Amino acid sequence: MLKYELIPEQLFYEGVISDENFLSPEIIKDSVVILTHQVEYYTRLKNLQLSAAEERRIGFKVSPKLVEREMRIAQGTIDGSISALENGVSFNIAGGTHHAGTNWGEGFCMLNDHAIAANYLLDQNLASKILIVDLDVHQGNGTAEIFKNEKRVFTFSMHGMKNFPFRKEKSDLDIGLNDGTSDQEYLKLLNEHLTNTFITFKPDFVFYQAGVDVLGTDKLGKLNLSTRGCKNRDITVFNLCRKYNCPVQVSMGGGYSPKINDIVQAHCNTFKAAVELYF
């Protein structure tokens, strides 16, 4: 998507970032991926052996370049999580591939970058209680399925109740929103439920899926957040991470407004909110 080129260009133009802020990920190791995804599914994905039905569920025909891109995205989220442990916050300009489950791809997602990175941190004893905050307009169904029996990971998804995926999985906390939900109600619910989650679960690391398809301009979202409301959402998440001393890794997630500028501005605001609060 064009936004993945325009976001860094805009951040460079505004002086928010510089070359030294960037990491360039390698291709992830197979041994790391299979901590999360079923070996049989991952092998067929890499060998381009998915069925036509599986490709339809993903939303496009799988190619070597797409698989490599997904593998680099996942490694980028791991690299970012390690950076967040050192610096408090980090970003993946792509990522947020939350519809990929243990043995399936869906909704333009083939490998679940937050789930892979969370399992990596647990496996390496770099974190012990991980909170995944998913504020994309679509439920993080793949993430919920992957961690349904993992007590060290708490899955929090606040999403459109009547939006894709129409068969939802059960997160540890699902907050389904009515169509047309706007800033005031959204931010009140988020602050209330996320604060309570921090207090009760006591995470030591956070992954944040910051999709901007919650905007009222989004053609797929059905919610009604303003650009300011979307940034205040990000500020709410970052303030809670800071209050409870939790490093946070952010992946971008979805955004489908007809005007590309609306998407880029909202994503850039997430970066700027973090810079304002952390640096």
Image (cartoon, rainbow, N blue to C red):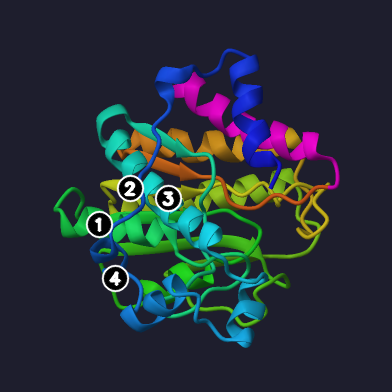
Labelled pair 3, 2 in contact (Cβ < 8 Å): no
Residue at which label 3 appears? 72
Question: What amino acid type is highlighted by mark number 1?
Answer: Tyr
Q: Is mark 2 on a helix, strand or loop?
A: helix
Mark 2 neighbour density, 10 Å: few (under 14) some (14–19) many (20 or more): many
Q: Judge depth for marks 1 and 4 and give the one in front.
A: 4
Question: What amino acid type is highlighted by mark number 4?
Answer: Ile
Residue 138 visible in rendering: yes
Q: Is mark 1 on a helix, strand or loop?
A: helix
Region of the chain picked out in magenta, as a range: 258-279
Residue at which label 4 appears? 34
Of the residues under marks 2 and 1, which one precedes in the sequence? Answer: 2
Residue at which label 1 appears? 120
Q: Residue at x 59, y 28 (%)?
A: 8
Labelled pair 2, 1 in contact (Cβ < 8 Å): yes
Determine the main secondary structure of the stretch shown in magenta.
Answer: helix
The label shown at residue 78 is 2
Question: What amino acid type is highlighted by mark number 2?
Answer: Ile
Of the residues under marks 1 and 4, which one precedes in the sequence? Answer: 4
| 266 part of magenta stretch | yes
Question: What amino acid type is highlighted by mark number 3?
Answer: Arg
55 lies left or right of 30: right
Residue 97 visible in rendering: no
Task: Say which quarter of the image contains residue 162.
Answer: bottom right
Residue 104 location (% of width, % of height): 49, 78
Question: Which image quarter is the C terminus in?
Answer: top left
Outermost top residue: 15
| 111 part of magenta stretch | no
